[in-house]
Image (cartoon, grey):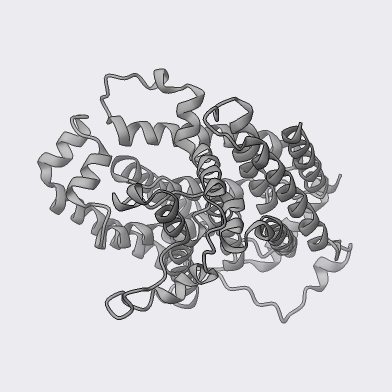
Amino acid sequence: MLKILILLISVILILNIYRRGRLLSSVSVWILCYNMIFVIYPLWGLDKEISNGELIDALALVGILSFAIGSFLGEKHRFVIKKNSLSNISSSRKPIFPSFQLAHVLFWFFFSATVYIIVTKLGVSGITRLLNGQVTAKKLALTYEVTSGTYVFAVHLLVPCVLVLWITANTRKERIISIIALSLYVIETLLFGFTRIFLITILGIIFFYSARKLEKGRQLRLAIIGVASVGLLMVFMNYIRTFGLQSQTAFRERLDLQYMFTSTDFGASYKWFSRLLEYGYPHISISAYFKPIFALIPRSIWIDKTRPLSLQILRLIDPALAATGYSTAGNSVLGEGFAIMGYIGIVFFPFLWGFICVRLDKRYYERLAEGNDQCLSNIFYYIFAVFIVLSGQRGDWSQYNTIVLYFYMIPMYLMSRFTLGIKRNYRHASRIEGAKSTWQSSNH
């Protein structure tokens, strides 16, 4: 019964943002992930070993109600586009735009670095074994430490390059370049990637950008197809990295519900939250969220530097597993709230997410209406709406916020402040006219 109430409230929230023309938003991503964890997964009866399911249902209901209240307050100052507002845009707003040319050069630099590291670490024989399906990417990563050090640094820096190339491409030649860059990144991640969230989020961001100006009905249809496709891709990536390219176990034989939920990590978030509730309030310090600042201090200087939140929790509820090096035991957004503030956090964390998501969504759609389509603020918004919201729902936000800041946002900001001396012609007036027609068609 409680699951039905959670689902009903979620549907009401989705219908509200759909009516406002903001279906593609951080609110919709948050609600979707929340329901996958607390409604869809347990509803299929895949949590038979969970003994505190009723308590989780009650807490999840409190969480979605708190999110709804937060989003309502965030919507308090209604976003209304007046007929003449587009022609009176404040001159004080000066959006900045990343450099396509600089992103292009940096992409090939970092991609070449990753290829060099792979060849150096694995050798031709290792790569051949991988392509022949004789060894899995997961085993290679653990054996040769391909996913550590310089390789990780270079791979992460490919992400802002790919996003800038895709979002700022204006000409046919630039679009071809962006497609090639994305394809190379996808292939490399599928073959040698150990963590799937980066590929999934970059595809989600590209989907958000590509569908931003479509009418509401078409957005809804594409969103349903997109969610199904991303889920299938996550399952396929887990299959490839675990069983290899030429596994004797057919992929279609793995398409059962249990394996699908295991591959998408939603079930893991539910289970680890259950374990955390059984353990009790762990009194984790909020300093776990200061990791972007603490990351600048070497552990050799600060030996007791704060660990990621999910790792701290894992060391408490399953120290044996933590001792093996396992560190990604995300326990959902409710788990993070409970770990930091106890039961109060289960109310406060969703409330805060609701308020922030709505405020950022409103400002994003306002920028679209103003014609600032390819600006840096919009790219940052896409990163928030997909990457940060998704990692926050997993309960691994403190694990990934440092990557977001130092490998995504700062490089993109630098791409917006430095150029290669090639000026691109951003036709601001034409973007505004395009925005006018888009909003007019969407409001009919």
Question: In this rendering, is residue 323 above or below 99?
Answer: above
Front residue of 284 and 310 = 284
| Residue 252 visible in rendering | yes
Horizontal relation, residue 144 to residue 159: left or right: left
Q: Residue at x 56, y 32 (%)?
A: 228
Q: Looking at the figure, which quarter contains the C terminus?
A: top right
Question: In this rendering, is residue 302 above or below 266?
Answer: below
Horizontal relation, residue 161 to residue 35: left or right: left
Which of the 4 image quadrants contains residue 227? top right
Which of the 4 image quadrants contains residue 106? bottom left
> Residue 384 at x, y = what percent?
58, 59
> Residue 176 at x, y = what percent?
43, 48
Q: Residue at x 33, y 33 (%)?
A: 240
Question: In this rendering, is residue 126 above or below 427?
Answer: above
Front residue of 121 and 368 = 121
| Residue 222 visible in rendering | no
Q: Residue at x 17, y 49 (%)?
A: 144
Question: In this rendering, is residue 161 above or below 144?
Answer: below
Number of disc labels: 0
Which of the 4 image quadrants contains residue 40? top right
> Residue 391 at x, y = what percent?
52, 53
Q: Residue at x 38, y 73 (%)?
A: 305
> Residue 296 at x, y = what percent?
38, 77
